[in-house]
């Protein structure tokens, strides 16, 4: 989410455009066969998985500028970075990160498919339900 919240500042004040555009270089990592995760800096920025995906896919700053257009990734890769790749980084890929028999059933039900919507609307996707180890731990209020 850093490109969204601090992209303009880094481009204009701390790094300059060239370095800011290579900040969080997800596409470069993919081209090199590297696994990576995207993240937030809670409590600096409030946790929001959909905002992480939005920022990784669009790389737009608060002003609407695109910070490093060549480093934008697909919604699928952004989702993978916060699920399967994150589980791998924590050495938990055998129990988390993907839905397979024998793994913990941790997942969310969303109101829209982040792979199919306009990328500019990903941040507006709502979590309808959260399932943790097979049990519902959150259900959005109707309406």
Image (cartoon, rainbow, N blue to C red):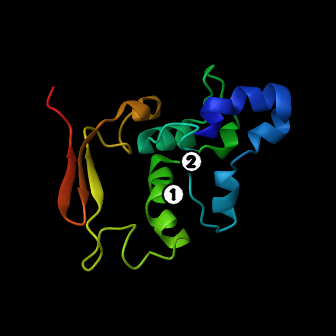
Q: Are marks 1 and 2 in contact (CB under 8 Å)?
A: yes
- The percent coordinates of residue 58 (x first, y second) are 56, 36
Hey, which quadrant is residue 48 in on the image? Answer: top left
Q: Residue at the front extreme? A: 43
Q: Nearer the viewer, residue 31 or 67?
A: 67
Query: In the image, 38: left or right of 116?
Result: right
Nearest to N terminus: mark 1 or mark 2: 2
Q: Residue at the top extreme? A: 63
Residue under the image location 46 percent in, 47 percent down: 75
Residue under the image location 42 percent in, 41 percent down: 50
The crowd level at tag 2 (other Cα within 10 Å; few <14, some 14-19, many 20+) is: many
- The percent coordinates of residue 117 (x first, y second) are 36, 36
Residue under the image location 43 percent in, 45 percent down: 49
- The percent coordinates of residue 133 (x first, y second) are 24, 66
Q: Which residue is mark 2?
A: 73
Question: In which quadrant will I find the N terminus?
Answer: top right
Residue under the image location 63 percent in, 19 percent down: 63
Hey, which quadrant is residue 140 in on the image? Answer: top left
Is residue 16 among the parts visible in the rendering? no
Label annotation for residue 67: none
User: What SS does tag 1 mark?
Assistant: helix
Task: Give the alpha-carbon distance from disc 1 to disc 2, as whole Å.
Answer: 10 Å
Question: In which quadrant will I find the C terminus?
Answer: top left
Hey, which quadrant is residue 67 in on the image? Answer: top right
Is residue 39 among the parts visible in the rendering? yes
Q: Nearer the viewer, residue 140 or 32?
A: 140
Q: Image height check: is 77 above or below 18?
A: below
Query: In the image, 96: left or right of 28?
Result: left
- The percent coordinates of residue 12 (x first, y second) are 81, 25
Q: Image height check: is 129 above or below 131?
A: above
Q: Which residue is mark 1?
A: 81
Tag in front: 1 or 2:
1
């Amino acid at each position: 989410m850093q490109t969204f919240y601090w992209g303009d500042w880094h481009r204009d004040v701390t790094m300059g455009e060239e370095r800011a555009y290579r900040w969080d270089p997800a596409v470069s990592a993919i081209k090199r066969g590297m696994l990576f995760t995207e993240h937030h800096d809670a409590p600096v920025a409030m946790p929001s998985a959909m905002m992480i995906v939005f920022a990784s896919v669009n790389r737009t700053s608060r002003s609407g500028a695109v910070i490093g257009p060549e480093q934008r990734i697909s919604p699928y890769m952004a989702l993978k970075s916060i699920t399967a790749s994150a589980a791998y980084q924590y050495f938990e890929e055998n129990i988390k990160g993907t839905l397979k028999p024998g793994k913990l059933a941790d997942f969310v039900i969303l109101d829209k498919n982040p792979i199919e919507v306009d990328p500019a609307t990903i941040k507006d996707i709502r979590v309808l339900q959260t399932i943790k180890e097979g049990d519902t731990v959150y259900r959005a209020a109707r309406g």
